[in-house]
Amino acid sequence: MFDITLILFMAFAGGIIAITGFSVILGGRVLEPKKALQQRIANLEEDVWKLKNKK
């Protein structure tokens, strides 16, 4: 009986770890384009500021 309980507990813990890992990976893939877009916007704003101050 103890063996079955241990196996079920390990399977449950493994499932929780797998779901957590999947969520972290998926979240990283979702947020990565946002970071790249924010960096491009910052660069464009800096270029616009430089062009405005050239005159």
Image (cartoon, rainbow, N blue to C red):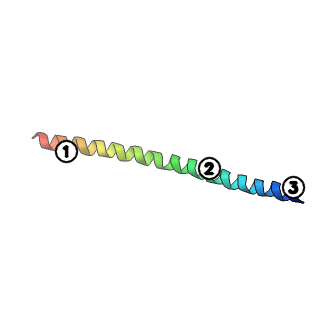
Name the amino acid, label 1: Trp
Q: Which mark is residue 3?
A: 3
Q: Which mark is residue 21?
A: 2
Q: Position of residue 13 (x, y in %)?
A: 72, 55
Q: Position of residue 2 (x, y in %)?
A: 87, 59
- Which residue is at 34% across, 42% downward? 40
Is disc 3 in contact with disc 1, using a CB cutoff of under 8 Å?
no
Mark 1 crowd level (few <14, some 14–19, many ≥20, 10 Å Cα)? few
Q: How many marks?
A: 3
Name the amino acid, label 2: Gly
User: From the viewer's perspective, is 21 left or right of 42?
Assistant: right
- Which residue is at 83% across, 59% downward? 5
Residue 36 lies in what quarter of the image? top left
- Which residue is at 19% across, 45% downward? 49
Whichever of callouts 2 and 3 sits on the residue coming sooner in the sequence is 3
Residue 32's place in the image compared with 15, above or below, is above
- Please, what secondary structure does the residue beneath circle 1 have? helix
- Please, what secondary structure does the residue beneath circle 2 have? helix
Q: Quadrant of the C terminus?
A: top left
User: From the viewer's perspective, is 46 left or right of 5?
Assistant: left
Name the amino acid, label 3: Asp
Mark 3 crowd level (few <14, some 14–19, many ≥20, 10 Å Cα)? few
- Please, what secondary structure does the residue beneath circle 3 have? helix
Of 31 and 5, the residue lying toward us = 5
Q: Position of residue 52 (x, y in %)?
A: 15, 44
In this rendering, which labeled residue sits more in front, label 1 or label 2?
A: 2
Which residue is denoted by mark 1 in the rendering?
49
Per the model, the C-alpha gap separating discs 1 and 2 is 42 Å
